[in-house]
Each structure stands twice: as C-alpha cells, then as structure tokens.
Image (cartoon, grey):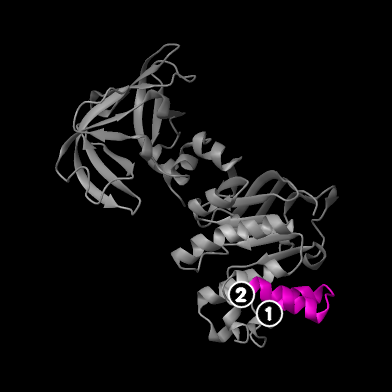
Amino acid sequence: MPEISFANVSKKFGSILALDRVSFDVEDGEYLCVLGPTGSGKSTLLRLIAGLLRPDHGSIYFGNKQVNNVDAQDRNAVYVPQQYALFPHLTVLENVAFGPLARDNAESVALEKARATLEMVRLSSRASAYPGELSGGMQQRVALARGLASGAGLLLLDEPLGALDARLRLDLRHKLRELVKQSGFTAIHVTHDRDEAMSVADHIMVLRNGRILDYGTPNRVYTRPTGIFVTNMIGGANFFEGVVESTSEKAAIVRISGGIMAHSPPELFTANEPTILAVRKEKVRISNSNPELDNVVSGEVREVRFLGSSREYLVRLTNGDVVVSRQFQEGPESAFKVGEKVFVGFEQIDITPFPYPPEGLRKELEVV
C-alpha cells in the first residue's frame, strides 16, 4: 500500500467547516490513530480517505497519485464504519467471507480466512447466526472481522472498539494492532479514547475543530504536547494561571493566584507576561511533611477517587485552586483521608509552560 498524503484538504457541509486545510503524511505499514472530541472532523477525514467523500479544496494522494476523484472501490481500502453496515440476509461467517470472495479468493480460502478472523474476535461460536440475532457489541466485532479479512492494503477504522465492554476492548486493541502489523496493513484508526490511541498507535494525530493540533509518536505527544488542549486530552493535567515575575537562565518565577510563587522552566517568557503552567497529575506529589521539591504549597484533601491501580486525590490549595494528584501502587487503604492537611509539591522540570491563550483557559479547554 503506498503512503497517504493530505495537502491542504478542506471539507465543508453547508456552513460547517469539518476539515480546515489539513496536511499530513502516513507511511506504508503505519498505524495512525486520529484522536479528538466529537465534531472534530475525525470521521470526515476517514471518509475522505475511503473515497466516500470528495474534498472541496486540496489534494489527497496515494503514493504519487492524486485520488480526489478515484472511486471508493478502486482505492484498495476497506472502511469499517461505526454503524457496522452488515448484510442482514447473510450469516456472520458469510459477512466476513464477503471481502475475500469479492477479491476472487476461492470459496474454501475465503471461508478459512473468515473463520480464523472470527476466532480472533471471539465470535467463532456465532458463525451461523445472522446480524439481527447479535448484540451491538457483537455486530461491531463482525464488522471489524470483515475488514480484517478483506485483504485490502488500507484499513480505515471508525471507532472500531467503541461498542465493546471494557475488558474485551482492552484485549482486542492489542490483538488488532498485532494483526495489522503481521498482515502488513496500513491502518488509520479513529477514536476518542486516548488510552486506546496511546497503546496501539505508531503516531497520533489530535484534531480539534477540523484542524490538526498535534501529530507525533505517542511518547512525544504525551511528554511534549504542542498546546494546552492537547495536554488535557492526552492524559489530563493541572493548569495554573499566572504572570511571570522574573526570569533567569535557570528558571522563571511565576506568580499564580493567592500570591503563590512557582519556579518554572524559563522557556522564552519575559517579565509581566501572562502564562499557563501545566503539571501532569502523576507528577504532583502529596505528603504529610514538607517535601524537598522546587514547588510546595499546603492544602486540604477534599476528595479521594479509587481507580483500581491508582487513586486520585483532589486537594484544595490555600489559594482556593484544586489540584489533582494521581498516586500508583498504593495499599488497600487510602494514604490520605478527606479533610487531611497535606503538602502538595512538584518539580520545576515537570512543569510545561504555555503562552496565555487569547480567549482564556476555560475556552481553550472546551471540547466543542
């Protein structure tokens, strides 16, 4: 499968600009996850690649060939939609075998591929059932199996695991990536689940309002996000609004609300410049005694959230701000209780400073 390129692609639906001058490249054999909130343009992007929509402006290339006007059936791509689109008059096995048969595989070969793929998605026992006899989650797995068995070089997945229960979703996401890699597919996987994207993707694209905000490896997007919205979407963070008091080669001193001073990386800020400081939840430490960290503020635990392998502590600081600290590998009892006085600390190196957004922090974090 050749590489895929978008060059300044835009698409409108009436007055709604679904994609706005989007440009990116996907290498042959790559697994790309497209992440973004509802209405960000994810499904529109996928349908443009599939040939189900035509761009209003810009060009789409498969290798060196522009495919703007190439029909969907001529793109060697299979699109797995959210709505499943199964043939109601065919059995589960026949639905999955449809793609291989359409590509002139012998019936015995097509059925063998279908059975093997159904085994992978744990539906071999329902091979003789009809779609109307299955739950929504089962129908989604059949649609996924049909795409995987098709033999197309390009796999386009629109929320492929969205209707599955949590346990099965975790299991299938890794099997899906494994099969894509073993089969040599190029995969473009749309999701709103950041954990899903982080665990399966070679690269992640973050979309918002039809524009690409970030594009890179999961590690780079997580550790060095391009902006406030991406930081919040990829893992969540605490955000502090402040003004730069002074800068040096080693640090910037930032005054946040309540007169609290924070030591931040200097970046390129100047004195009196407004800024946002972002600190990942897992980088915020809480303790009963004053820790030896670059930034320490006292507060009170207001809420404890049990998350299985971790807990989140919501701590109200002396200035009224609420900070979230995520703690891993604790015992059966919470290390800190609601109402307990604690110290909150984080290192300067764990702060990511951003310029203050023109429309304010709240507007910058909105998902619509």
Q: Which residues are magenta?
A: 96-118
Amino acid type of the residue that numbered disc 2 sits on in the rendered structure: Val
Query: What percent of the width, then of the height, locates residue 315?
Result: 23, 40
Mark 2 to mark 1: distance in Å?
8 Å
Check if residue 113 falls in the magenta segment.
yes
* Marked residue nearer the N-terminal end (2 or 1): 1
Local SS, label 2: helix
Q: Which mark is residue 351?
A: none
Q: Are marks 2 and 1 in contact (CB under 8 Å)?
A: yes
Residue 66 is at least partly visible in this image: yes
Where is 185 relative to 131, above or below? Answer: above
Q: Is residue 149 magenta?
A: no
Count residues near mark 2 (Cα–Cα under 10 Å), then give few for <14, some for 14-19, many for 20+.
Answer: many
Classify residue 28 as left or right of residue 311. Answer: right
As rendered, which of 85 and 176 lies closer to the eye? 176
**Overall secondary structure of the magenta section:** helix
Residue 142, which numbered label?
2
Tell me if 264 is positioned left or right of 296 in this view: right
In the foreground, 351 or 145: 145
- The residue that appears at 83% across and 75% down in the rendered structure is 105
Residue 112 picture location, percent across and down: 73, 76
Which residue in the protein does label 1 denote?
Answer: 95
Is 67 or 121 nearer to us in this picture? 121
Q: Amino acid at mark 1?
A: Asn
Residue 321 shown left or right of residue 106 in the figure: left
How busy is the neighbourhood of tag 1: few (under 14 within 10 Å), some, or many (20 plus)?
A: many
SS state under label 1: helix
Horizontal and vertical percent for residue 287? 23, 33
